[in-house]
C-alpha cells in the first residue's frame, strides 16, 4: 500500500511547497494581510476538525486512510479551487484565493512539523484501526 500512498503524499508535499513559496512572494509584495492568515488557519483547522470528527463518529477506519483523506480534502481540493479561481478575475476571488493559498501552506507546514499527530490521531481519539 505504501507504493500507492507515497506518490499521493509526495504530490501533496510538492503542492504545499509551491503554495508556501507563492505565499512568501505575496507576503513580500504585501498582497496578503492578517485577515487572510486568520481565515486560512480557520479553514485548515475546520477541515481537519471535520475529518477527525468523521472518523470519531464512525469509530473505526482503515489504518492508512489518512494518507488518502487528509491530502485529498486539505491539499488537493483547495489547491484545485485555487487554480480554478484564476478563470475569473475579481476582488472577491482574489481574497478567497489568498485564504486558500494560506490554508494549503499552513496545512503543509503543520503536516510536516507534526506529521505523527496529523496522520496518526487514531490512538488519541480511540478510533479502531482496520488493517
Image: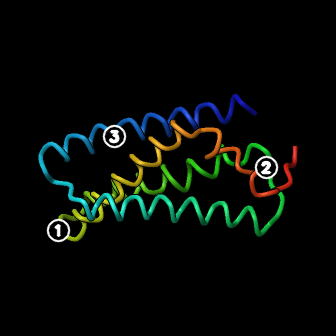
Residue ranking furthest to the left: 29
Query: Mark 1 near mark 2, Cβ–Cβ under 8 Å?
Result: no
Dot 3: element? helix
Q: In terms of depth relative to the viewer, which is nearer, 63 or 78?
A: 63
In the image, 27: left or right of 40? left
Residue at horizontal 17 percent and vertical 68 percent from the top: 90
- In the image, which disc is placed on residue 20? 3
Point 31% across, 57% down: residue: 37
Instruction: Classify residue 14 as left or right of residue 119.
Output: left
Q: CA distance from mark 1 to mark 2?
A: 45 Å
Q: Quadrant of the C terminus?
A: top right
* Residue that badge 1 annotates: 90
What element does badge 1 sit on? Answer: loop
| Figure quadrant of residue 43 | bottom left
Which numbered disc flags the more N-terminal residue, 2 or 3? 3
Picture quarter with the N terminus: top right
Find residue 123 and name its label: 2
Q: Residue furthest top?
A: 3
Amino acid at each position: 500500500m505504501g507504493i500507492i500512498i507515497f506518490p499521493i503524499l509526495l504530490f501533496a508535499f510538492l503542492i504545499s511547497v509551491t503554495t508556501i513559496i507563492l505565499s512568501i512572494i505575496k507576503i513580500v509584495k504585501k498582497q496578503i494581510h492578517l485577515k487572510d492568515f486568520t481565515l486560512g488557519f480557520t479553514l485548515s483547522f475546520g477541515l481537519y476538525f471535520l475529518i477527525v470528527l468523521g472518523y470519531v463518529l464512525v469509530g473505526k477506519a482503515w489504518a492508512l486512510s489518512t494518507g488518502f483523506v487528509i491530502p485529498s480534502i486539505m491539499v488537493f481540493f483547495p489547491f484545485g479551487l485555487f487554480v480554478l479561481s484564476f478563470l475569473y478575475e475579481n476582488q472577491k476571488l482574489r481574497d478567497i484565493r489568498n485564504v486558500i493559498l494560506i490554508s494549503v501552506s499552513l496545512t503543509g507546514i503543520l503536516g510536516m512539523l507534526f506529521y505523527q499527530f496529523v496522520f496518526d490521531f487514531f490512538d488519541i481519539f480511540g478510533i479502531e484501526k482496520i488493517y
